[in-house]
Image (spheres, rainbow, N blue to C red):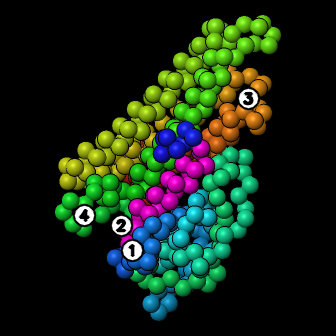
Amino acid sequence: MRPLGQACGSTAWAIVQNISHNSMMCRWPEQAQEDVWREDPAALLSGILIPNLGKARRVDGGYILSGRWPFVSGVSLADWAIFTAFTPGPNGEEEDRHFLVPKSDYQILDTWYAIGLKGSASHDVTLEEVFVPEHRTTTVDTMRARKPLFDGEAINMRAPLYCMFGVYIGGTALGIAEGAVNIYLEQARTRVSRVSAKAVSDFSTQQVKVAEALSCLRAARLLIYGACQEMTKILESDRLPTDEERARCRAEATFAGQLATRAVNVVWDAAGGGAIYERNPLSRYFADMSAANRHITQNWDVSAISHGRTALGLPLDNPTL
């Protein structure tokens, strides 16, 4: 996602959503996978996994699903979408259930008028009394882990998807930040101060800001790639990550996003008044990062609490991880 994010944050954001939701299909029954890809092997998925926005009731052969979900990024590109709602579990407890729905059964609302990631198509979506057959549903527990279906199955298909989703989003944010810093460097190398008529690159204050931004990017890259390498090592050892390892993975990916945001803010402040014009691409990167940083996976307080709790020996507070 990094190269895409460097060029266009909206494109990277939409594609990472489609890729992530496509990957989730390995947790669905084979019949559901056939429904999606039998006729169109290139079919894309989108979705939103906020269960308290939907209502589902069990009927013969499946469920009836209704609700309205926001932030369904990439939905305009998608052929199917995944939605969630609470349903009664086998022992009477609430169960976070996922529903796979074709685009013919949901309505996309034209709601995405945001300050950043404008092209990500993160519209609201509504469903009204839609029947979803049993084989097109699964539970949140199946997203956490799964044994391989066959020898030689790709390692990444066995990784806990919610845990890794934060890494994918963090990588997208990193690409946006790299694009912003690259644009700033291009501008600063030839920019002349209107007040002093001196080259901006000669100002020590600018040099300090460049060093800070580049250091933030390098640290973010090390965190993102380190999280991927650690997860690969765990899975290759033929085990699944512990709760503490899951929480650490999410926290490190989130912290990488925080560093990426810091890099953008540093060059934004260094760029001066010329950056505020829409014609300056730096303004788009700044707006895109502002929007990306609002995603729940980029919320440092949420991710840090989970990491801190497990490090202190307390139970993991995020069931999706």
Q: In the image, is residue 43 above or below residue 144? A: below
User: In 3D space, how far apart are the residues under numbered discs 2 and 1 (Cα atoms)?
Assistant: 8 Å
Q: Residue at (50%, 90%) from the top-left corner?
A: 59
Residue 317 visible in image = no
Coordinates of residue 301 in the picture (x, y in percent): 54, 42
Q: Residue at (59%, 80%) from the top-left corner?
A: 105
Amino acid type, callout 1 = Gln
* Crowd class of label 1 (few under 14; some 14 to 19; many from 20; radius 10 Å): some
Amino acid type, callout 2 = Cys
Q: Residue at (40%, 77%) from the top-left corner?
A: 38
Circle 4 SS class: loop
Coordinates of residue 195 in the picture (x, y in percent): 81, 10
Give the quadrant of residue 128: bottom right
Give the quadrant of residue 23: bottom left
| Outermost residue toward the bottom in this view | 60
Amino acid type, callout 3 = Ala
Residue receiving disc 3 = 275
Circle 2 SS class: helix
Coordinates of residue 122 in the picture (x, y in percent): 64, 58
Residue receiving disc 1 = 33
Coordinates of residue 156 in the picture (x, y in percent): 32, 54
Which numbered circle lies on residue 26? 2
Residue receiving disc 4 = 148
Q: Give the magenta part as a residue range.
A: 8-28
Look at discs 3 and 2 and give the one toward the viewer. Answer: 3
Amino acid type, callout 4 = Pro
User: In 3D space, how far apart are the residues under numbered discs 4 and 2 (Cα atoms)?
Assistant: 10 Å
Instruction: Confirm or deny contact between disc 4 and disc 1 (CB under 8 A).
Output: no
Which numbered circle lies on residue 232? none
Look at discs 3 and 4 and give the one toward the viewer. Answer: 3
